[in-house]
Image (cartoon, rainbow, N blue to C red):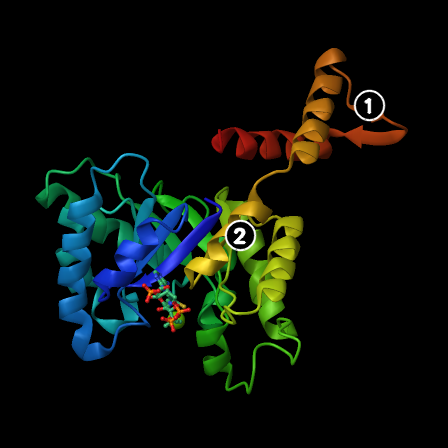
């Protein structure tokens, strides 16, 4: 998944618009963009929407962001939406593998009650929204076969830190949150799931978004969350492997295939060894997923 577009669950108009945005996934939000008193209504709108679009051909992945385990609202969220068969849920304020095990159990019970195959609903976790979560970023491996991605966020974390800002005047992420970003990458790699970059909230700043996508792709993120449809084409473009990158990766795979049992080869005067091969195969898999 390259682009994951947030849509407040209580807005049928935005939900419809999001379907034609070109996003690989929609994140239907029951959490921060929904006021406390509007949660019950938002759950109903979300479930009705999921049911209405479930059978559409070539639709985006449908992910519901539920409220965190600390809120006491997660059970009611899941009661309302599991029967409508979302592809995945997003767990905010996750605190390590234990919170995934906990969420896995909640999903398993509701899948059984709704006659859905066990494990069919995946989990994406936001792994850096509390201070405690940072120390648990390495604990996701093996927590649940449902885990499909980790992402990170700076808003709740900066509130918890008592910080004045999480970006500088040029919109660049400040040091404490760069650590959170790196822990997300490391936690995802250790758990062998995709890392997804956080949102860029200044949705009129196309250049800023482009720069952040380039940095994220360079560092190993597979995609990025969006808050506005205008961000989707930029994210899709920058997270789709270019023809050049694909050709280069294919050349590396071919060079190793031509010399079985060899650990290092040279291509155009540059040393290429096993880590390059791993990276090349991963890029080709990503390119193939787009075809
Ligand atoms: N999904 C689908 N449609 C969206 C959208 C989104 N995330 N954000 C904006 N749109 C629609 C608007 O409804 C509007 O539609 P229209 O032309 O038919 O009236 C159009 O895109 C242009 O929107 P614009 O006027 O530029 O922005 P806005 O002021 O209406 O909305 C936000 C700005 C931030 C409120 C809106 O982008 C939004 O709700 N984003 C998601 C917020 C969220 O989920 N946050 C939680 C995660 S951080
Ligand atoms: Mg939040």
Image coordinates of residue 97 in percent, x first then y, are 40, 54
Identify the residue at horizontal 25%, vertical 62% (top origin). Answer: 13
Left or right: where 202 falls relative to 68: right
Q: CA distance from mark 1 to mark 2?
A: 34 Å
Please rate how many residues cluster around mark 2, counting C-alpha atoms within 10 Å: few if below 14, some from 14 to 19, many from 20.
Answer: many
Residue 125 placement (x, y as % from top left): 40, 56
Mark 1 in CB contact with mark 2 (< 8 angstroms): no
Above or below, comparing residue 63 to residue 248 in the picture: below
Q: Position of residue 255 (x, y in %)?
A: 75, 19
Residue ID for mark 2: 235
Measuring 61% from the left and 58% from the top, which residue is drawn there? 210
Q: For mark 1, what is the residue?
A: 265
Q: Nearer the viewer, mark 1 or mark 2?
A: 2
Which type of secondary structure does the marked residue at label 2 adopt?
A: helix
Question: Horizontal placement of 153 versus 56: left or right?
Answer: right
Question: Which x, y percent locates residue 187?
Answer: 53, 53
Disc ID at residue 239: none
At 61% from the left and 60% from the top, the residue drawn is 212
Q: Is residue 106 above or below residue 30?
A: above
Query: Is residue 85 shown to the viewer in this render?
Result: no
């Amino acid at each position: 998944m390259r682009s994951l577009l947030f849509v407040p669950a209580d807005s049928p108009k935005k939900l419809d618009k999001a379907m034609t945005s070109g996003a690989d996934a929609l994140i239907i939000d029951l959490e921060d963009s929904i006021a406390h008193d509007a949660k019950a209504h938002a759950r109903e709108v979300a479930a009705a929407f999921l049911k209405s679009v479930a059978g559409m051909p070539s639709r985006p992945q449908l992910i519901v962001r539920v409220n965190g385990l600390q809120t006491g609202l997660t059970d009611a969220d899941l009661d309302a939406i599991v029967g409508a068969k979302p592809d995945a849920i997003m767990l905010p304020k996750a605190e390590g593998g234990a919170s995934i095990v906990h969420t896995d159990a909640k999903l398993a019970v509701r899948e059984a009650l709704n006659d859905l195959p066990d494990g069919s609903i995946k989990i994406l976790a936001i792994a850096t929204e509390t201070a405690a979560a940072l120390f648990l970023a390495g604990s996701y491996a093996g927590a649940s076969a449902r885990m499909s991605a980790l992402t990170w966020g700076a808003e709740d974390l900066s509130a918890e830190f008592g910080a004045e800002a999480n970006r500088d005047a040029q919109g660049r992420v400040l040091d404490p949150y760069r650590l959170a970003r790196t822990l997300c990458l490391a936690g995802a790699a250790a758990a062998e799931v995709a890392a997804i970059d956080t949102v860029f909230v200044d949705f009129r700043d196309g250049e800023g978004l482009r720069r952040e996508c380039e940095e994220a792709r360079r560092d190993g993120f597979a995609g990025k969350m969006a808050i506005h449809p205008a961000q989707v084409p930029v994210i899709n473009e920058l997270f789709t492997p270019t023809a050049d990158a694909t050709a280069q990766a294919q050349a590396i795979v071919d060079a190793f295939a031509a010399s079985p049992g060899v650990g290092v080869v040279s291509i155009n005067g540059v040393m290429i060894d096993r880590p390059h091969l791993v990276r090349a195969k991963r890029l080709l898999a990503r390119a193939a997923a787009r075809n």
